[in-house]
Image (cartoon, rainbow, N blue to C red):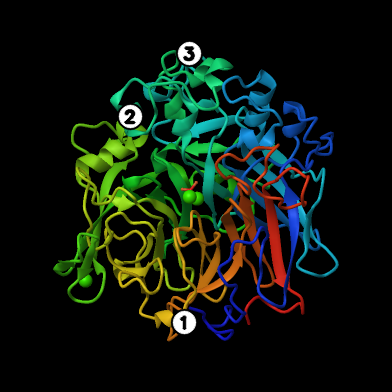
Amino acid sequence: HRPGTSGARGLRFSPVAPNQDDKVTVPDGYAQNVVIRWGEPILRGAPAFDPDKQSAKAQAGQFGYNNDFLSLLPLRGERGRQVMVANHEYTDEILMFRDYDPANPTREQVEIAWAAHGLSVVVVQEQHRTGKLGPVGRHPLNRRLTATSEFRLTGPAAGSPLLRTSVDRSGRTVLGTLNNCAGGTTPWGTTLHGEENFNQYFAHGNTDMHKRYGIGTGTTERKWERFDQRFDLSKEPNEANRFGWVVELDPYDPDSTPRKRTALGRFKHEAAQPRLTSDGRPVVYMGDDEKFDYLYKFVSSKRMKKGNSRAAREHNLTLLDEGTLYVAKLTGDSPTTEIDGTGKLPQDGEFDGSGVWIPLATGTTSHVPGMTADEVYVYTRLAGDKVGATKMDRPEDVEPSPRTGRVYVALTNNSDRGKAGKPGADEANPRNNNKHGQILELAENWDDPASDGFAWRLFLVAGDPDDPSTYYAGFPKENVSPISCPDNVAFDDHGNLWISTDGNKLGSHDGLFGVATQGDRRGELKQFLTVPIGAETCGPVIQERRVLVAVQHPGEVDGASVENPASAWPDGPGKIVRPSVVAVWRKDGRDIGV
Ligand code: FEO
Ligand code: CA
Ligand code: CA
Ligand code: CA
């Protein structure tokens, strides 16, 4: 299976073949550089990275661990420079510290891990008129936000008793952001960051809601609860309620306190990407990355103000505090045929149907019987359960096309679909024991993102193209690159969808793919790059002349450690493995894929 070097505009490159090489592989004629690695100093006073002399103080001024979402924003008045914002989803202590003892982490190791979480803002500079990018150390916009920085809870549930703790009786001030996975960039110049698997940081869960959010009853793997009792829910039962939100950051204001937007609900937020209604109100699409969890949107009641005046900026920072939160219910439009207990094929030949957005809460008004508005925002999963939302195959990143308005939802996989006691296949989640995932394409009624209904169809049912259950938007499958486990999605200026993967089950490494969503090449999926051993591909940003990816958790393989690394990326044998951001460009200086 190999597509050609021709393709839709923006996708004219020689596809990278699936491989297991311990490097970033890019198409012929393209070049790459490592933009920034874990531990590189970005703030004034931070030391150069030394894996044997790590400290929490040093890490708090250095680029964090496990880069995930990336945003590149314009920087006016500084030629060749842009503002890069990165998420640092989680830490991999066994790959960070020599002689790490998982049963007995030291206070210093735990505090380094706190400082390696969170967000980085770092100005990057183009070098030598190529696509090569590098960090501008000590730039005044550079910033680190960590697991101990101050964040403000805003919106309708801020101050709720459910969000108060013994330390913060206001229920409005939280220390830290955790497990920032993917995110989004708003048209008003801020970035959004999903707090995803926050459950793993909290010990001794003891309520039904702790359980519904995946918080265990025992101790945690990182044992942070030994060093700060807020991570012990038997002592501070509401602390976990202060995580699992969408964070909004103003990267142009280094003194601003980032906000956790309660109006967007609390779940394992993968990402959040807005689209504006015709009258200028943002609608934010969001997935809850859990097997059998839901797809959501938030519709603001306020219009964005254009321009960069102080008044406009202050107004726009309130857009995500007022509006309505919805959850999706999808219905298939045709009878289905069972295929040997492995799933279902629709009898009309297409995986499609209609859907409704069920309102959960508007401001301080709940639309869910038996739940207050505060409860809807803080226990959003329960609200989705109560209204009968459709249980999806792990909704990851969601991205509206800036060209067509159609919304693309990466459903990464679901090994429990169809298991005893679990929901079986349906037309939108058509495979039991779903190893490879699918991408849903959703069209809002009348192309209005605030609509309460939509049409949907599957754009891609991933996996080996020879497997009859796969579907590549109707394109001939002998001419596509195989894909598995779609996670992050992004659009280029041509309207092509770019998809990065996490956990490829086809035996080759994760990577980045591009595919046309319109025209006669719709569905012609082409692989653009692959990542090293153990890594997943994150944060794709597709610019005219540059592709940026975050290579997350390279070398994360069972049994690997600092002493016994599984990967030698990016610096070669004998050097510690470091999650890093990579830029890719064309050697001849022309635009990507034209
Ligand atoms: Fe952190 Fe759902 O990927
Ligand atoms: Ca992800
Ligand atoms: Ca159908
Ligand atoms: Ca993932």
In the image, what residue type sits under mark 3?
Ser
Residues under numbered marks 2 and 3 in contact, where contact means CB atoms less than 8 Å apart: no
Q: In this view of the protein, can residue 361 be seen by the observer?
A: yes
Write the residue at 46% across / 62% down. 506
Q: Nearer the viewer, residue 102 or 564?
A: 564
Residue corresponding to mark 1:
479
In the image, what residue type sits under mark 2?
Lys
Write the residue at 52% across / 15% down. 229
Q: From the viewer's perspective, is 52 left or right of 296?
A: right
Write the residue at 58% across / 76% down. 15
Q: From the viewer's perspective, is 520 left or right of 442?
A: right
Residue corresponding to mark 2:
211
Neighbour class for label 1 at 10 Å: few (<14), some, many (≥20)?
Answer: some
Residue corresponding to mark 3:
166
Q: From the viewer's perspective, is 481 left or right of 148?
A: left
Q: Quadrant of residue 236?
A: top left
Where is residue 267 shown, x and y percent of the image? 39, 39
